[in-house]
Image (cartoon, grey):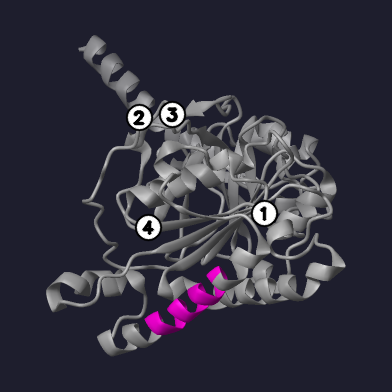
């Protein structure tokens, strides 16, 4: 009988002890150690109190991410974000996002283990391709694939020095869009050397301002024509129109993507005085596409390389998708603006990029000669086009 009672006591102790410990510490078992480490990191309020870990759980949206909930009076969200690198070091995590909790005294930290590392090179495989028109997969962050949805953003800006992989990213995006049935136009005044891949042989290529100006004029005219067609079809954008094409016997339309290599040369930032007038017209047309091209399915992908390059404010303000690879500070500021603070991690490896929301990722390596394209004609059209929340996630 005594043995039975002893066994029962052990079982009850096993059940009660964890709860008692949680109650004693005011949170998970490691809460006290976490609080001590935050003090070491300097994350304290005016009287020296550090936030207390109240709970943690695996994110239902991404099993790689652990969510930490902290109670912290007197430590506002902005301070958490300013101390991200210190917090990561103190807790041996890599923060993906920091958000306000259910009230102003609670903060949620979305993080992955501090031991997680990005791969040095990830060869492209067709199985990575998205099964949605207008959506391309660019690479892998610590928390999963990094995607660009041209149904949401009318354009993308990619910056980086020679060897950074910026042209590789543009080629990768164009490859996927071409597979989806898009019309790809390549503008490169240096002869399109990076685009000398068999699958782009049939694409239109532009090599001088005299060709670029009429091209953009025709694209703007097509954009305005499509807007009238969409109004008559009661479609707000290209995906909605494409859903109605077969059912209602409408004119077939496909996405048009203009890929511009060394955009400063093409858009008139680095040109001789004699070419300034034409260059200004080209830039004005590009700005018009940046402002109004999203719904009509006419998009721009711009790559810039030199620190003396510049992108007009009109274009940058209409571009929520910006990526920068290896670059000096001047070029980083041109591409990303002031969206990242001094604590941001900057790429130091070919193919490594950071987006303007702070996500660090490795771009897939695509070799068109070694990766023959599969002809896919069954890409489903997106059911609903939703606004993208550009925020950092985790592994």
Label 4 and label 2: CA atoms lie apart by 60 Å
Where is the N terminus found, in terms of image quarters?
A: top left
State left or right for residue 108 relative to residue 226. right
| 168 in relation to 123, above or below | below
Marks 4 and 2 in Cβ contact (< 8 Å) = no
Q: Nearer the viewer, mark 2 or mark 3?
A: 3
Give how far across and how far down residue 260 sits, in percent.
60, 56
Label disc, if present, on residue 72 of the rendered structure: 1
Q: Secondary structure at mark 3?
A: loop
Give how far across and how far down residue 21 sits, in percent.
51, 33
Label disc, if present, on residue 15 of the rendered structure: 2
User: 311 and 153: which one is in front?
Assistant: 311
What residue sits right under mark 3 in the picture? 369
Q: Could you tell me which residue is drawn at 68 percent across and 57 percent down?
A: 263
Confirm whether the magenta stretch covers residue 95.
no
Label disc, if present, on residue 182 of the rendered structure: 4
Confirm whether the magenta stretch covers residue 218.
yes
Sequence-wise, the earlier of marks 2 and 3 is: 2
Q: Nearer the viewer, mark 3 or mark 1?
A: 3
Marks 1 and 2 in Cβ contact (< 8 Å) = no
Q: What range is drawn magenta here?
A: 215-226
């Amino acid at each position: 009988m005594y043995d039975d009672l002893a066994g029962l006591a052990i079982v009850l102790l096993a059940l009660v002890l964890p709860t008692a410990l949680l109650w004693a510490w005011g949170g998970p078992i490691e809460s006290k150690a976490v609080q001590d480490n935050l003090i070491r990191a300097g994350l304290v309020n005016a009287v020296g109190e550090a936030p207390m870990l109240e709970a943690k759980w695996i994110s239902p949206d991404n099993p790689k991410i652990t969510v930490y909930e902290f109670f912290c009076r007197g430590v506002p969200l902005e301070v958490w974000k300013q101390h991200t690198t210190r917090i990561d070091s103190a807790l041996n995590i890599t923060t993906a996002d920091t958000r306000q909790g259910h009230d102003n005294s609670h903060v949620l930290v979305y993080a992955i283990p501090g031991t997680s590392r990005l791969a040095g090179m990830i060869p492209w495989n067709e199985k990575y391709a998205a099964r949605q028109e207008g959506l391309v997969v660019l690479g892998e962050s610590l928390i999963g694939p990094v995607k660009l949805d041209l149904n949401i953003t009318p354009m993308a800006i990619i910056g980086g020095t020679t060897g950074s992989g910026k042209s590789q990213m543009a080629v990768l995006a164009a490859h996927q869009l071409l597979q989806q049935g898009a019309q790809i136009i390549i503008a490169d005044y240096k002869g399109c050397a990076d685009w000398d891949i068999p699958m782009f042989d049939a694409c239109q290529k532009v090599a001088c301002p005299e060709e670029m100006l009429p091209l953009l004029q025709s694209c703007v005219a097509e954009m305005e024509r499509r807007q009238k067609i969409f109004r008559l079809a009661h479609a707000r954008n290209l995906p909605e129109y494409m859903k109605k094409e077969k059912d209602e016997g409408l004119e077939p339309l496909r996405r048009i993507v203009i890929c511009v290599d060394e955009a400063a040369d093409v858009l008139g930032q680095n040109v001789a005085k004699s070419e300034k007038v034409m260059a200004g017209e080209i830039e004005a047309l590009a700005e018009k596409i940046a402002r109004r091209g999203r719904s009509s399915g006419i998009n721009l992908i711009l790559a810039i390389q030199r620190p003396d390059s510049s992108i007009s404010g009109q274009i940058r303000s209409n571009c929520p998708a910006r990526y920068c690879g290896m670059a000096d500070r001047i070029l980083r500021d041109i591409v990303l603006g002031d969206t990242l603070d001094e604590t941001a991690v900057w790429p130091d490896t070919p193919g490594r990029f950071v987006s303007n929301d702070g996500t660090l990722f490795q771009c897939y390596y695509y070799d068109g000669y070694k990766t023959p394209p599969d002809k896919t004609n069954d890409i489903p059209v997106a059911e609903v086009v939703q606004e993208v929340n550009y925020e950092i996630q985790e592994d």
